[in-house]
Amino acid sequence: MSEAAATLTYREACKQALRDALKADPRTFLMGEDIGRYGGCYAVTKGLLEEFGEERIRDTPLSESAYVGAGIGAAMAGMRPIVEIMTVNFSLLALDQIVNNAATIPHMSGGQFAVPLVIRIATGGGRRVAAQHSHSLEGWYAHIPGLRVLAPATVEDARWMLAAALVDPNPVLIFEHIMLYNVEAPLDPAVTAVDIAHAKIRRAGSGVTLIGYGNGLVKALAAAEQLAGEGVDAEVIDLRVLRPLDTPTILASVVKTRRVVIVDEGWRSGSLSAEIGMRIAEQGFFDLDAPLRRVCGREVPMPYAPHLEDAALPQPADIAAAARSLVRPT
Amino acid sequence: MTDKVRLDRAYLHHLLRQMIRIRRFEAKCVELYQAQKILGFLHLYDGEEAVSVGVIETLGPGDAIVATYREHGQAIARGIGMDRLMAEMLGKQEGCCRGRGGSMHIFDRKSRFYGGNAIVGGGLPLAVGVALADKMAGRNSVTACFFGDGAVDEGEFHESLNLAAIWQLPVLFVCENNLYSMGMALERAEAETDLGRKASSYRIAAASVDGMDIIAVEAAARHAVAQIRAGNGPHFLECRTYRFRAHSMYDAQQYRTREEVETWRKKGPIVRFQSWLRDNGLLQDDDIRQIETEADAEIGAAVAFAEAGTPEPVEELERFVMMTEVPA
């Protein structure tokens, strides 16, 4: 198979990125639950223990607060750790370390210490694993000054965001959506780096702007296809970086399409979608021809039963319907 | 053996001087607090000086320290200049953290002082990480992690001791057991009040010492640090001490009696060490006067430095929220 034609799963892209990082910098090591012998609960780290050894692929006890905090301390003391948290719900057990230490210490110490730490966190719903493994809490983290929050939605971003995150002197949280690990896509061999500062237009259009990230982006793109069949030309923005938000890219699209639907798998109240909507209201109000619309997760703990979980999550049809209502108001 | 405390006069005077410097620095802080020049919370170390001085005296410049919000003692014992400390208290940009941290959040990169952490228990995971980095980088350093008895209530204490034990990390866990976490008495908070037993349950070598006896603290710390440096894994040192003053500047102290405080005051680390030195002919009144005079001069200069300090321009408010580089 030629390199140009190579397709890759999102999972494999994550793993290649980790392998690159471990090879490139002896200060980099991995810590997390079941990342070694077990191979990673989503198999992202499978094989890395054999390749890099126990010193650098560190299985941890179920002590999220201790090993995330240890990652912070190690980063402050010169290492470049990558910490994995199995699912965003478990990250709440490490919230003290992430919010009270990683995010505050550079500022609180007057710039004496940086925290060059990367935390990878699996997130999102759709796997029928109910209310303690399926939520999308990345919007909470996007609330915290001092953190950079990334959400790779494409195989390309899964492959290259990590390297950029490791160069960043700040704590970077990378949210990998659990429904994306099996997604396969060709990887452009000409691309060997991506930025972690900007949103990206994944589909250019002129009729309506759909804004999403993670699996929400995939659904927005599917909705855009539906809409195209109806003669509605949707532009789709992949947020990519949830904090700091790339407001200019959003506003430029609003100028172009004058209509916006924001897709957010998180709960509506106090969500990232609310922040994006408000920024458009503050800075792009007079460019709008229609009210802002949001398609969000329903405000329930995620249910197990498939039909209920599907109903709780934004679906392409919901996004398309919201877009339609803006383009052809009834 | 390096376990024996060097009983030469100069060294003993140095230990006393360090405790007196801390005590008098904080007395000045109280004045400045009452004058509303120091704001917010001010947690005094009054009564616990032997712990930080005794432990930190056994560390080298390559070792690291993680402390709590009651960390003036550790900062001074570590050699952070009183001028930069006082400027920090007064919120000036000449302060060690440019006035962003204040009393509870002293950091000093040069002396590997990884902060005053004001979340009880929150510093322990950091200490584990600093020690992990040192070990992985092949530095033969020890991280001394200070925390109070209240931290033992927290899950982070147990998670961190366990992690340090399974990875055999060079951490000296120093529990400053002053019997109260704010107003909560140890025996009301913990089913097992023998804190060393908790550390032992993680297969960490544990010792308990009289934290009011600087010689005992120094000897125990010296032994533990030597063991850790020799590659024998983390150690736990409980220093039984007492906080003479309120938890922060004001509390009604309804959780303890006046008599209890007075009894402990008589056992205070400075008064006790001074009388021991005197009894052994190692200290004269003139020595004490000289130490106090020198400390007061140093403190006076620090206050003058801090008073003359400048406020950081408000335009710099967001500086360092996101770092542009990792400081070398």
Image (spheres, helix red, strand yellow):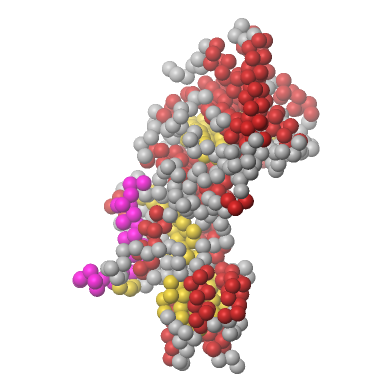
Residue B166 in magenta stretch: no
Residue B302 percent coordinates (x, y): 63, 30
In depth, the one of B51 and A322 nearer the eye is A322
Q: The C terminus of chain B is located in which quarter?
A: top left
Asked if residue B5 is positioned above or below residue B118 in the image, the reply reads above
Asked if residue A255 is positioned above or below residue B323 in the image, the reply reads below
Count the labels in the image.
Answer: 0
Q: The N terminus of chain B is located in which quarter?
A: top left
The answer to whether any part of residue A255 appears in the image is yes
In depth, the one of A32 and A111 nearer the eye is A111
Q: Quadrant of residue A132?
A: bottom right
Say which residue appears at 49% left-offset and 44% top-offset: A113
**Horizontal arrangement in the rendering, residue B233 relative to residue B41 (left or right):** left
Residue A212 percent coordinates (x, y): 49, 74
Which residues make up the magenta segment?
A: A1-27
Say which residue appears at 36% left-offset and 53% top-offset: A36
The answer to whether any part of residue B210 appears in the image is no
Residue B26 percent coordinates (x, y): 67, 30
